[in-house]
Image: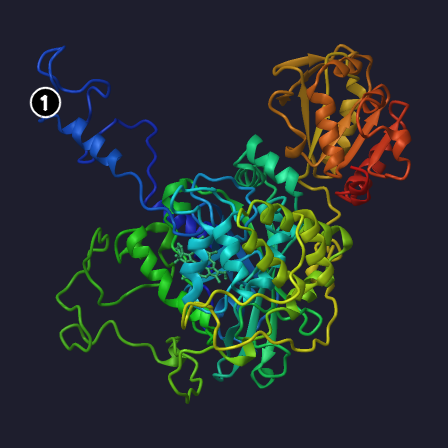
Amino acid sequence: MKKTDKTNPTGSDAKQQDLNLNKSDASDQFLTTNQGVKINDNNNSLKAGERGPSLLEDFILREKITHFDHERIPERIVHARGSAAHGYFELYKSLEQYTKAEFLNDTSIKTPVFVRFSTVAGSRGSTDLARDVRGFSVKFYTQQGNYDLVGNNMPVFFIQDAMKFPDLIHAVKPEPHNEMPQAASAHDTFWDFISLMPESMHMIMWAMSDRAIPRSLRMMEGFGVHTFRFINSNNESHFVKFHWKPKLGTHAVVWDEAQKISGKNSDFHRQDLWEAIETGNFPEWELGVQIIPEADEHNFEFDLLDPTKLVPEELVPVTIIGRMVLDKNPDNFFAETEQVAFHPGHVVPGIDFTNDPLLQGRLFSYTDTQLSRLGSPNFHEIPINRTVAPMHNNQRDGHMRQEVNTGRVAYHPNSLGGGCPFQAKIDEGGFVSFNERIDAQKVRERSTSFADHFSQATLFYNSQTPVEQNHIIKALRFELGKVETTAIRERTLGLLSKVDKTLAEKVAKGLGSTVPSTLEKPINHGVGADANDNQEPTTVKQSLESSDALSMLKNKTLSNTIATRQVAFLCADGVSAASVNAMKTALEAAGAQAKIVAPHLGTITAEEGDTIVVDQSYQIAASVLFDAVFVPAGEGILTLMDIPEVPEFINDSFKHCKFIAAEGEGTDILSITNAKVKDHNADEGVLTSEKKGEKNFAGTFIKMMGKHRFWEREKLV
Ligand code: HDE
C-alpha cells in the first residue's frame, strides 16, 4: 500500500497550501484593473467636463461595474444557508479488514477536510435557528482523490425514493404565490405533503424534536443517512452506516429560545463556529461506523436500503474509528464556503454505494446542480474543490478552464501520447465498482420491505424522555397551528396516531381538534396521486422498544463539560470586582467564557475602584445568546433593579431552564424575577450565596452549570 509522502504537509495545512496558490494579498500593492493596469483615480468616472455625461470609453468604470453586476451565483436549491471550516481527520485504528480506502487504513495519515454545515429550506440570508434538518457535509482530500460524506444531523430522511425529492422541497420552501414563510416548515404546503406521505413519519419525529434546533453546529451529531458499502482488497463488501459524534455532546436550545435568537442574532450558529475556531477552541467529532456483514442484509426488521430507517445502536454498535478537528476558518466565504461542491458520488476505492433509491437519485443530482450553480463543468478546478491527488484525463475546454493542457493528445487509446494517461489496474488503485449481482425485471415500484412507516417513528418517540416528548408535542402544535387548512391538520393527526395515540391526542388538544378514528385516504385523482399507491403501510413487530442513543438527554456522553459555554455577568458601576474576578477566573479555567454585561459599553467602576471592561450593553445582550447568567455581589448591583432588561434577562433564562447564580447583593436581584430562590427550593439550577467569596461557590457553579438545563422548571413556567 502506498503511504503518504511524509515530506508533504498534512491535514488542513496541505489543503491550505493548495489554496495559497490562488490567494491574493493586497497589502503594499497598487490598485489595478483586472488587466494589471495601475489605477490613478478610484473615485470619479471619466466625464465630458466636470458636470458632463460619463464616457463609454471609461474602461475602468465599465470593468468594475460589469464585474459587480455579475458577482452573484445562484444559491443552492437546498442547503443555501451554510457555514464551513477547514480541518483534518485522523484515524485511530486501521479498517483494512473492511475497506481498502487508504485514509481508513493507515493511522499515520492526517487527511485534510473541509466541512460545511447548513440548513435546508431557507435562503442564503435566512436565520440559523430555523426548525430544520442541518446538513453536515465533509470533503476529505485524500491521496486517492476526494471523498465526500454528504450527510445530515439526523440519521433518516423524509422520503424513500428520489422521485419525491422535488415534491418535498417544493412543499417545504416558501409558498410560490407569495414567497412565505421563509426558512420554516410551519405552513400548509409542507404539512399537506407530509399528511399524504406516511413514510415521512419517522423523520417528522426527528424534525419536531429539539435535534432540529441545535445549540451549536459544534454540538450536533452527523449521519451518512444511507447505507453505504466498504470494499476491502479481497473485493468483499460490508454494509456501513457513518456517524459523527461531537466531543462537546449533543445539545439543543428550546423553541421559544430559537425564535428569539433568530431576532437577536440570526448568525448565531455561524458566529459561534467562527469564534470557537478563532479562539482556538477547535470543534471536534469522532467518526463512528456500524458495520454489517453482507450475509446479514436481510436479518433486520426493516430494509437496510430504506433511508427512512436507522440501524439502532443496540442492534449494531457504533465503533469509533477516528476524529475530525476543525482548526481553520475559511479565508473567503464565497471562494470556499459558497463554491465548495459536494457530491455523494465523490468516493474513493474502498467505498461504494448501495441500491438505496434515494442515494441512487442523489448520485445523478449533485454534478448536475453544480453546472447551473457554478456554471461550468470545470467546477473541480476551483481551489476548494481541487483534489490533492494527481489528476490527469482527456477532458478539455469548457467555460473558465484553468488548466493549460499541453500536447496534441486528448483521447484514449492513443499511441501519439504513449498511451498516457493510462488506466489503473485494481492493484494500482483503479476504482472498480462492487460487482453486485443484479438479475431483475424493470419495474416502477417500491419494495414491500419499505412499507412499515410507523414502527421506527414509534421507537424514536418511545426512546425520548418525557421532557423531550413534550417538546415534540409542542413543536407539532406550533407547526400545525400555523396550518390554515383544517383537513391537513386532521389528516396529520391521523398519521400521528399511528405513531403514538397519546401523542396525537395531546397535539389535537392543543389544536382544539380531535384525532380521526380512521386514516383518511388521500384524494387520489388516478394513478400516482398517492405517492405510494402500490402498497398499504404495514407494521412489523419490533424487538426493540426503546433506544437510549436516540434521546439527547439519555445519551449524555461527555456532555457535562462547560467548555466554550457563554456566561453573562450582569453588572453595573459598584459591582464587586472580587466577586467578578473570582468567578471569571474559575469559569475560564473550566474553559467557559465570561461576558460582562452593563448599562453601557466602555468601562464600569467596581466598588473597590477597579475598572472593568464591558463586553455588551443591556441593549445588545439577551439571555438567549448565553448558556448561563451570574449576578455578582456589590452594593452597586442593586441599581440593576431599575433596568427593565435585567428581570427580562433572568426571567428568560429561568423560562428556558438555564443555570442562574447570584452572589451577595446579587441575590436581591433574583427576588424581582421568577428565579426567586425561596419559591424554588427544589430547583438546583438556581444557585445563590448570600456571602461574597464563599468557599466552593465557583466549584458548585461549574458543576451545576454542567447539567446545562433544569427541565423540572418547565412545569412551573
Ligand atoms: Fe441533497 N442536494 N439531495 N440530500 N444535500 C444538495 O447539491 C438532492 C439528500 C445534502 O453543503 C444540492 O450542491 C436530491 C439527502 C446536503 O454544499 C442538490 C436528493 C441528504 C447538501 C441536492 C437529495 C442530503 C445537499 C444543492 C434526493 C442527507 C449540502 C446544492 C434524491 C443524507 C451540501 C448542491 C453543501 C445539497 C439534491 C437528498 C444532504 C440540489 C436530488 C437524503 C448536506 O444537488
Q: Which of 268/318 is in front?
A: 268
Tell me which amino acid carries mark 1: Leu
Q: Residue 123, how many percent across, how many down?
A: 43, 43
Which quadrant of the render holds ligand 1? Answer: bottom left
Q: Is residue 155 visible?
A: no
Q: Is residue 569 left or right of residue 682?
A: left
Residue located at (75% from left, 50% from top) = 467
The image quadrant where one finds the C terminus is: top right
Q: Which of 528/339 is in front?
A: 528
Residue 422 location, quadrant: bottom left
Q: Which of 434/208 is in front?
A: 208
Residue located at (61% from left, 34% from top) = 260
Q: Is residue 150 visible?
A: yes
Q: Residue 34, how many percent across, how many down?
A: 20, 35
Q: Residue furthest bottom?
A: 439
Q: Is residue 178 left or right of residue 714?
A: left
Residue located at (75% from left, 48% from top) = 560
Secondary structure type for disc 1: loop
